[in-house]
Image (spheres, helix red, strand yellow):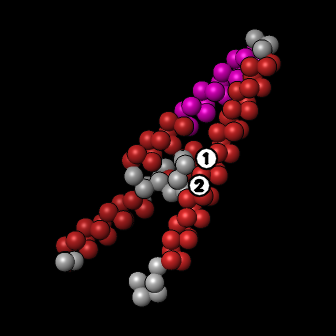
Amino acid sequence: MITRAKLAEQLKDYQSRSQHKWDSKLTIFSPKPQLYTRTDVTVARVLAILVSAVVKFTFMALYFRNFRLSLVMICFVILLLVCLKISRRRKLAMKRERRMLLPLSM
């Protein structure tokens, strides 16, 4: 049974989730379209650190004139970012499709 206290708690949780400032900055590195939980934020941070480390190693490879290795690293970063964008779009499409399947009375 839904009580007033449960509704107030859900509203409080929703408001606290919507007030996060890191949402727009880390969304680029997240496989999900929006960051709701701490695990989403953690995954986005890990991927951001991974991308920045690979970019730094690319610059180091260019400094030591290892052009093939730097090209491979650049391709890896581009592929990673494209895959993240594709997964975000796929999840948004599935969410829209699920919404369309709900009856209108919901």
Q: Which residues are magenta?
A: 48-63
Q: Amino acid at mark 1?
A: Leu
Within 10 Å of disc 2 (Cα), the crowding (few <14, some 14-19, many 20+) is: some
Question: As displayed, is residue 71 above or below residue 100?
Answer: above
Do residues under tags 1 and 2 come within 8 Å of each other at their CB atoms?
yes
Q: Residue at x 32, y 63 (%)?
A: 13
Q: Secondary structure at mark 2?
A: helix
* Magenta highlight: main SS: helix
Q: Residue at x 51, y 57 (%)?
A: 34
Query: Residue 56 magenta-drawn?
Result: yes
- Per the image, the residue denoted by label 1 is 84
**Tag shown at residue 88:** 2
Q: Residue at x 37, y 65 (%)?
A: 15
Q: Secondary structure at mark 1?
A: helix
> Could you say which quadrant of the image residue 55 lies in?
top right
Looking at the image, how many numbered discs can be counted on the residues? 2
Farthest residue toward the bottom? 105
Q: Is residue 79 left or right of residue 3?
A: right
Within 10 Å of disc 1 (Cα), the crowding (few <14, some 14-19, many 20+) is: many
